[in-house]
Image: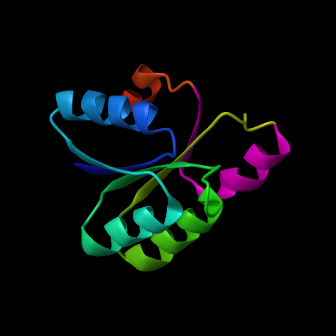
Amino acid sequence: MNVLIVDDNASAAELLQELIVLQDHTARCAFTAREAIETFDSEHFDVALVDLTLPDRPGTEVARHLRQTAQDRPLMLVAISGYGVGDAAGAQAAPLFDHYLQKPIDFDALDRI
């Protein structure tokens, strides 16, 4: 499985990348919306973990682009955010994603999905 991790917190993204690689998957990090879109457009990903609050665009815009670009190709989108699903930002974003994980990420929960 190839995973794209989109988070402006480089330390958190890189730690998550290491954990995913330890599970025998491949993973790439992008730290801005622009970088995420460019990376996604140049490589096939099965899963994208997208932070909702990025410095250059909201994670919801990234999610919309990834869905449109993937078209018929299977893609699991997972929102990662400090906001809970009950918060306004989380509730608004939740329908765009297959799953929603609140930070700090529970790796066991991520592993289950």
Q: 108 or 18, which lies in front?
A: 18
Q: Is residue 106 visible?
A: yes
Image point 37% across, 77% down: which residue?
72
Image point 35% across, 67% down: which residue?
40
Image point 80% across, 36% down: which residue?
86
Image point 67% across, 33% down: which residue?
82
The location of residue 60, given as percent across then percent down, is: 63, 61
Residue 60, placed above or below residue 90: below
Q: 108 or 50, which lies in front?
A: 50
On screen, residue 105 versus residue 52, left or right, reads left
The location of residue 27, given as percent across then percent down, is: 26, 46
Q: Count the numbered circles shown.
A: 0
Q: 12 or 77, which lies in front?
A: 12
Query: Within the image, what quadrant is residue 10 found in?
Result: top left
The location of residue 61, given as percent across then percent down, is: 62, 67
Q: Is residue 71 visible?
A: no
> Within the magenta stretch, is there residue 90?
yes
Task: Specify the segment rendered in magenta.
Answer: 87-103
On screen, residue 5 versus residue 67, left or right, reads left
The location of residue 35, given as percent across then percent down, is: 42, 64
Residue 109, placed above or below residue 32: above
